Image (cartoon, rainbow, N blue to C red):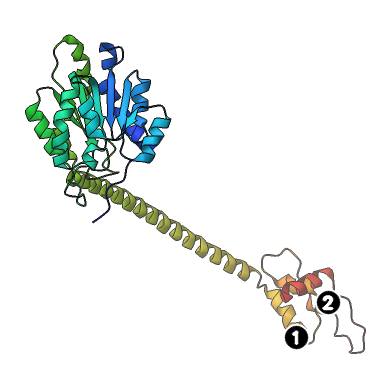
Amino acid sequence: MTPPLPRLSAADAETRRARFLPFVLPWREIDLLPRALDLDCGAGGWLQLLSAAGFDVEGSEIDPTLREEAQNAGFAVAEDMSFHLSELTEGSLAVLSGFEVLTRHDPAGIDALLPHMLRVLRPGGLLILGGADVEHPDAPPARTRATDLFERLRAENPGRLKIVRSGSLADDPWGTSPANVTLVLQTDAKGAAFDRFHAAFAAAPSLEDLHPTRFDAYLLDRLSQLDAIHMSTRQAAEERTLRLERRVTELEALQAAQRQEIESLRHLTRRRGLRKWLHDRRAGRKTDPDAADADAPGTDLPAVSPLSVPERPSPSAPLQPLSTRMQALRERLAE
């Protein structure tokens, strides 16, 4: 079994709990200094939000380190939650919150605390209980089921009641991370002043709204998204492959054209006069390169009579320097 779900970080807790300010802020229009108590308050993040909003705040925290941190921040924080509740006057609190109550207390503990919680609330007072739901597959069996508590409160109290989820299904597909499931109850109250709370309760999702967003629905939605991504990726890959095939065909055609051009150039350089001159050179005869080129097709040079070809020099004759054209031809043949 996995260890108990950890407490939220201070920054994460403050972000999530700020969502519940719209539920409590109408009290500032009814009372100049409404009183609020936060159970399992930790380092006092929610107390800080309420205090800044104009509430008279206090808390309780069993963890000595967190309790000292909250006290150092200037808040009155007790250690024993049950004793603190029993000492409060009936109908003295406008807001009673416990964002870790469902995580830290089993159903029996909640049953023992709930009458005291309802007793100390004023008419129209708000009870906010949050934590982890036992619908998580690895959750300890002793934790309180938020949906069961919701049904019980709805049956026993005529006031407004909502169950609110924090975070997203992507973070927690089962919707059961710490403080992710929160019940908000407003005790019954008469008067137009309490109509101010209607907007916040109307905006929050109801229990029925949560059923389609359970893990199976989230999984189906996620699979649909992945399927769409797969189809898009496959289509893009096919289009890219087609473009590459077209490019390969173009390059092959270009390569064939270049080979044909090279062969044509090679054919043009095979001049008959040049071949004759080479043959004569290999046979030991010296010929005039200009005369050798005379028979080359496509040239404008006049033909040279064979009678004008000089006789073969004697072996003892000094070597004649090559003309510029002959030197160019020799260099070309040497390549």
Q: Distance between the residues labelled 2 and 1?
A: 21 Å
Which residue is painted at 24% across and 26% down in the image? Answer: 96
Amino acid at pointer 1: Arg
Within-10-Å neighbours for mark 1: few <14, some 14–19, many 20+ = few
Which residue is painted at 92% across and 89% down in the image? Answer: 316
Q: Where is residue 173 in the image (x, y as percent from the top left)?
A: 24, 45
Q: Where is residue 62 in the image (x, y as percent from the top left)?
A: 30, 39
Q: Which of marks 2 and 1 is nearer the N terminus?
A: 1
Residue 332 vs residue 324: left or right?
left
Which residue is painted at 26% across and 42% down in the image? Answer: 169
Q: What element carries label 1?
A: helix
**Residue wearing tag 2:** 308
Name the image quarter holding residue 144.
top left
Q: Which mark is residue 282?
A: 1
Q: Where is residue 61 in the image (x, y as percent from the top left)?
A: 31, 36
Amino acid at pointer 2: Ser
**Depth check, front residue: 136 or 66:** 66
